[in-house]
Image: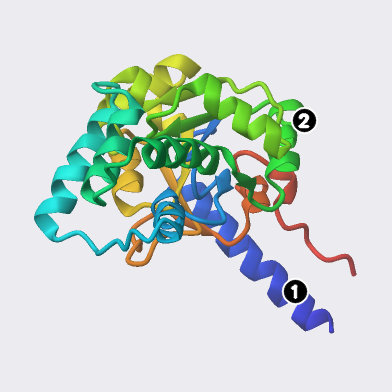
């Protein structure tokens, strides 16, 4: 009915006005987390390793907090480039009690294979292409990873995403992880923009908070449990196109009489 149409328009107008108030500057770039936002894995590396070791009759128990802290410390060093990624994998194997060299070699190959088997989230490729080529918006990845940028780009290409990123900021190459300020600064420097000219799309509360401290507008997507503090929330990847300062064409038009 006309009244329902007008009410829908007014709600859209109100949301647009709120967004204009909340996001005062034109946004020139969108920064994305990689794992969980751009892509996902059907099975985690640790779960895959557990399944493999079970075939070798090696039963794996859960880590206690102290053991987990030690393994995660090595993982953080791998993610900041202080040690090679294999050091993290070997720490896992040592914890799980793998001593046979043949089994270790198989497990290391498995972990590398699982790491590279990524699947793009729905509508990622088309949305990124539109942002960059049609809307002239800069796009970047900001990722915590122990794998090189070259390796991660190969994963994405194999998964069906072959695009020229304006920046690809990788923790193991810059020596800092999200939510540390330095990694967000590396991204804005590489893009030639200020923090308040960027959206950051992520799922982790800590990483969103880190982006916010750098002046970015934070967008939660596929957010983790307990992630409740952000500027805007999206339900699907392609909804990034509906952000007012990127795609003003989506401003709700008044209904025709």
Mark 2 neighbour density, 10 Å: few (under 14) some (14–19) many (20 or more)? few
Mark 1 neighbour density, 10 Å: few (under 14) some (14–19) many (20 or more)? some
- As drawn, 60 above or below 120: below
The residue that mark 1 highlights is: 6
Q: Quadrant of the C terminus?
A: bottom right
Q: Earlier in the sequence, mark 1 or mark 2?
A: 1
Point out residue 163 in the picture as x, y percentages from the top left corner: 69, 26
- Residue at the image position 63 percent from the left and 61 percent from the top: 13
Tell me if residue 109 can be seen: yes
Which residue is more in the foreground, 246 or 35?
A: 35
Q: Secondary structure at mark 1?
A: helix
- Residue at the image position 65 percent from the left and 53 percent from the top: 239
The residue that mark 2 highlights is: 134
Write down the quadrant of residue 8 in the picture: bottom right
250 horizontally vs 64: left or right: right
Write down the quadrant of residue 57 in the picture: bottom left
């Amino acid at each position: 009915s006309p009244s329902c149409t007008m009410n829908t328009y007014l709600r859209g107008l109100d949301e647009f006005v709120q967004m204009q108030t909340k996001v005062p500057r034109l946004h020139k770039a969108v920064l994305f987390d990689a794992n969980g936002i751009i892509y996902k894995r059907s099975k985690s590396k640790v779960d895959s390793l557990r399944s493999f070791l079970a075939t070798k009759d090696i039963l794996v128990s859960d880590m206690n907090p102290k053991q987990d802290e030690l393994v995660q410390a090595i993982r953080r060093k791998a993610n900041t480039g202080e040690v090679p990624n294999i050091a993290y994998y070997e720490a896992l194997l040592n914890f799980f009690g793998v001593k046979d060299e043949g089994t270790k070699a198989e497990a290391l190959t498995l972990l590398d294979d699982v790491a590279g088997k990524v699947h793009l989230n729905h509508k990622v490729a088309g949305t990124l292409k539109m942002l960059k080529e049609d809307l002239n918006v800069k796009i970047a990845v900001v990722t915590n990873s122990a794998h090189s940028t070259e390796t991660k780009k190969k994963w994405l290409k194999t998964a069906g995403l072959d695009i020229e990123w304006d920046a690809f900021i990788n923790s193991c190459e810059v020596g800092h992880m999200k939510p540390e300020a330095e990694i967000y600064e590396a991204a804005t420097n590489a893009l030639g923009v200020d923090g308040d000219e960027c959206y950051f799309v992520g799922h982790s509360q800590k990483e969103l908070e880190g982006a916010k401290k750098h002046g970015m507008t934070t967008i939660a997507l596929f957010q983790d449990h307990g992630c409740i503090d952000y500027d805007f929330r999206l339900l699907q990847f392609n909804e990034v196109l509906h952000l007012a300062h990127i795609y003003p064409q989506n401003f709700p038009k008044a209904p025709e009489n």
